[in-house]
Amino acid sequence: MSAIGISVFQGYGPDHEPFGLHTAERIDSNELLKLSGVRHASAYGLQVALLAHAARAAIGDARTGIDARRALVTNGGPWAIETALGFLKTARDRGSQFVNPLVFPATLVSAGAAVVGITIGAGAVAIAVGHDELAFFEMLRRSRQLISHGVADQIIAAAACAPSAALITTLRIAGRTARIGECSVAFRLEADMHAAMVLEDITIGSDPSPWSSVSLRVEASVSPEGWTVSEGCTLADRQFLSASGAVLCATALRRYLTDAPSGQAMVVTCRRSGVIGAAKFRKR
Amino acid sequence: MIYPAIRRIAARTSLGDWPTTWTGLLAARSVWTSTSVLAGLDIVELNVGAIANLNRELFGTGEGPALRLARSVLNDVEPDGDTPLYVGSNHSEAELVRTLLGEPTPGQGVAMLDDRITPAQSVRPLRSYAACAAGLHALIAAAHDLVESDAPRRALVLAVDALSVIETMGFTRAGALSAQGARPFSVERDGLTIGEGAVLVELDRFPEAHHVRILGIGMSCDAFHPTDPDPSGQPLQRAIRMAMTDAGLDSTKIAAIVAHGTGTPKGDEAETAALIAIWGLRPPPVTSVKGSVGHLMGAAGLLNLAVACEISRTGLAPPTCEIADHQHLGDWVVTGSSRAVPCGAPVICLASGFGGNNVAIVVGKS
């Protein structure tokens, strides 16, 4: 499989901390929703607004109309349960006639991909993939396939995370106590090779040591208590759920781009429940 | 590109299992008062009492209907634990919502539907979310993986959606439900009928002669509106042309079309525009199953693929129900009884989802 050019973008303006990892206290949710470019953004929630900011950054924030060769691949996951619960509780407590039909599409897992796809004119595909900490590796694999099978020339692989009451409850009853952090990050993958680095390969499986000859490695494992990251990058004391892999890769790649010599390969792996997602990058 | 074949099909629809569903479709049977707990309720008049009843059924203890449907089709094929599973669904978080609407307790355990399926499979499922095109996107992911890898030989693709309070209320409040039952492509169509079901197909990289194969894949996105299709039908047209090009076929070689055909005024209009742009006023026979079994949401696309495979295998295109007494958008719509097409010939199936994700897949024996 041929290598794909890959570039990293953050979801906030350049004056913010990288990838929003440490900006939770400084987020103005209303402002983010307002500037997201998503119609009825409040119905979709902060996570979708963050996703939109990252995706727009990845295409230069230029509304260029619909591009039939541009695709959007986002992280799936239980993002819509807050909306879905609100929808159901309104019907239960007040009657179905009080349910806002505009909120209905926002109850779907695919809602974020759909509405952000509109904002960036993703005319090839706008889908969500995966739903747990390995989601980003599944996103990368689908993105590569969409390029190699001729569906798109440019893929925006964007992942975001934001806490909600329903998500926090979900983690609590699952026995997980870590805080959920806000983040958004987007990767632009293109068949043409102008990017400073390439995604050489991607794998998801039970093999514990993919590309073992590569010395530069960033390894993370997920447990109910949170993340353990070996070295190479530091994550905030928060969980990013299905955006975790994107945050890990983005953080590692920033250091890698700065510190590693040209031609050096780097492997980022994430282990969860015995399954390993791994991506191999190479700097030009 | 050599895509895998469809080795086995299993399904649960309101007509029954897959063999019963297929014979029911050929006989123009229509069962959209589903086996679900919603049967007997006036879905247009949902009120607090009805919701409470539904909550007891849908959000009570035990497994939810989507999970039960998924397990039942998996049991049909008795998969080995090493075959990868690809899942497409509209509301796979429904299992979470069920838990949260109850009185969850710490340590109770909580998971999305896909994870609840996992114990039957030792291989982690791969999930795709593309609203009502989710099933076909899951199929495409599986097909691409099989094309690119030497192992494994086979993959399972599961698409499932059960009737839910959310979608019933959502479509009701959006004014998208038919008062009389979906009449796809009828000029008197007034909306969709919500269905439920599960479809599972097994893909095989090394088909036998009698297997129908995937010949071409196309996809596009309207990027137009969260729920409405692009009325021009141009993005859908692009997906169809991409699939035919991928298959190395021109439009004259397509023997039949299994349309998305929801029965909504806007949806059928956009789809008709796409078909006419490609085939003019003489497209191959077009059929929709949604007058028979309703709209299976996330499973609808994979059901269309199953129907396309049977059409190619048997040479019979089933009729579109509920339009026999109505005028329809073109005489190319199969009505009344099934229509003969050449056995083994390429058949195209379509699916479109909220947000405008369109998928077109050509299957056949060529």
Image (cartoon, coloured by chain):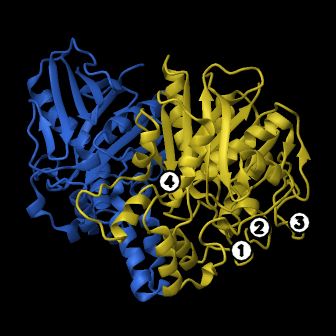
Task: Please report contact status of discs 1 and 2: CB closer than 8 Å, yes or no.
Answer: yes
Q: CA distance from mark 2 to mark 4?
A: 29 Å
Chain B shade in the render = yellow
| Amino acid bearing label 3 | Ala
Please state which of the two labelled residues, at mark 2 or mark 4, is closer to the viewer: 4
Q: Front-most of B115 and B175?
A: B115
Residue at mark 1 = B190
Which quadrant of the rendered structure holds the N terminus of chain A?
top left
Inspect this view and state whether residue B254 appears. no
Residue at mark 2 = B183
Q: In what element is the residue under mark 3?
A: loop
Task: Please report contact status of discs 2 and 3: CB closer than 8 Å, yes or no.
Answer: no
Q: Residue at x 65, y 60 (%)?
A: B295
Q: Position of residue B90 (x, y in %)?
A: 50, 56
| Amino acid bearing label 1 | Asp
Q: CA distance from mark 4 to mark 1?
A: 31 Å
Residue at mark 3 = B324
Left or right? Give the position of B14 relative to A120.
right
Q: CA distance from mark 2 to mark 3?
A: 9 Å
Residue at mark 4 = B67
Q: Position of residue B304 (x, y in %)?
A: 69, 47
